[in-house]
Amino acid sequence: MANRWSRPGEFTELVQIGAIRVNARTFAVESEMEVLVRPRINPVLSDYFTALTGITNEDVAERGIDFVEAYRAFLEFTRDCTTLAFGTDDLIFADNIRLYGLQGMGAPPPFINLRPWFNANGVPTAKLHSCDVGPALGIAFEGRQHNALADTRSLAAGIRVMLERGATNPLR
C-alpha cells in the first residue's frame, strides 16, 4: 500500500469481502456476508497487512476461498440491491477480475461512492477510512478496524446518525 502497488509483483488482490444488507429507509442491518479470499499471485500475506486487518495466513488457509467463488457470493448477496461503498471498491473488484483474466464473469454491480454524500453533509472524508466514519460521528467502533465487515457496519451506523440529523437518504 505504501507504494500504491506500483512495484513489480504488487497487486491489489482482494483478501476479504464484507457486505451488509440494510433497510433502505432506516439503514438498520438486515443481513451480512463475509468471506476471506485466497490471493492467487501473492498468496502469503504481508506482516503489514496482518497487523492492519488482523487477518493471518492461517485464517486464509483455513477459511479462504477462491476469488471466483467469493465474487459469485458477493454478486448473489448484492443482487437487486443498490451497492454503496466508501470510495471506489468497484474498481478493486474490476482490477481483480482483470488480474485473474475473468472478464467473462461480468462487471461488478454499480456502486455509489459515499464520500461525496458524507462531505456534502458536513463530514469531511479526506483523511478518513471507512472504519473512521462511525467514530467521527460519535459512534463507538465495534470489531477490528480495517476488517471489511466491521468497517461496513461503521458506515451504516454513520449513515443512520446522519439520517437522524436530517440528511437526505443517500439512496434517493
Image: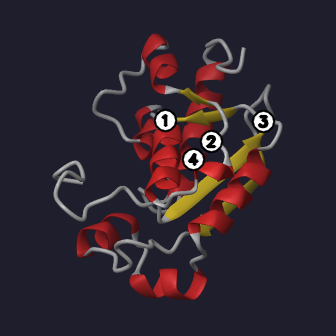
Query: Which circle marks residue 152 in the picture?
Result: 4
Q: Earlier in the sequence, mark 4 or mark 1?
A: 1
Identify the residue shown where x is 45% and y is 48%.
95
Q: Which residue is mark 1?
A: 86
Identify the residue shown where x is 45% and y is 88%.
58
- In the picture, measured across the screen, residue 142 lies left or right of residue 30, that is left
**Camera-nearest label, 3 or 4:** 3
Identify the residue shown where x is 34% and y is 75%.
45
Q: Is residue 140 visible?
A: no
Alpha carbons under labels 3 and 4: distance apart: 15 Å
Residue 96 position in % (x across, y down):
48, 54
Between 153 and 113, the residue placed more toward the observer is: 113
Q: How many neighbours does mark 1 have within 10 angstroms: few (below 14), some (14-19), or many (20 or more)?
A: many
Three-letter code, disc 1: Phe
Coloration mode:
secondary structure
**Camera-nearest label, 2 or 1:** 2
Q: How many neighbours does mark 3 have within 10 angstroms: few (below 14), some (14-19), or many (20 or more)?
A: some
| Secondary structure of residue under mark 4 | helix
Three-letter code, disc 3: Cys
> Is 107 placed above or below 47 here?
above
Three-letter code, disc 2: Pro
- In the picture, measured across the screen, residue 79 lies left or right of residue 168, that is right
Q: Which residue is mark 3?
A: 81
Q: Which residue is mark 2?
A: 108
Q: Earlier in the sequence, mark 3 or mark 4?
A: 3
Residue 19 position in % (x across, y down):
65, 51
| Image quarter of residue 10 | bottom left
Alpha carbons under labels 2 and 3: distance apart: 12 Å
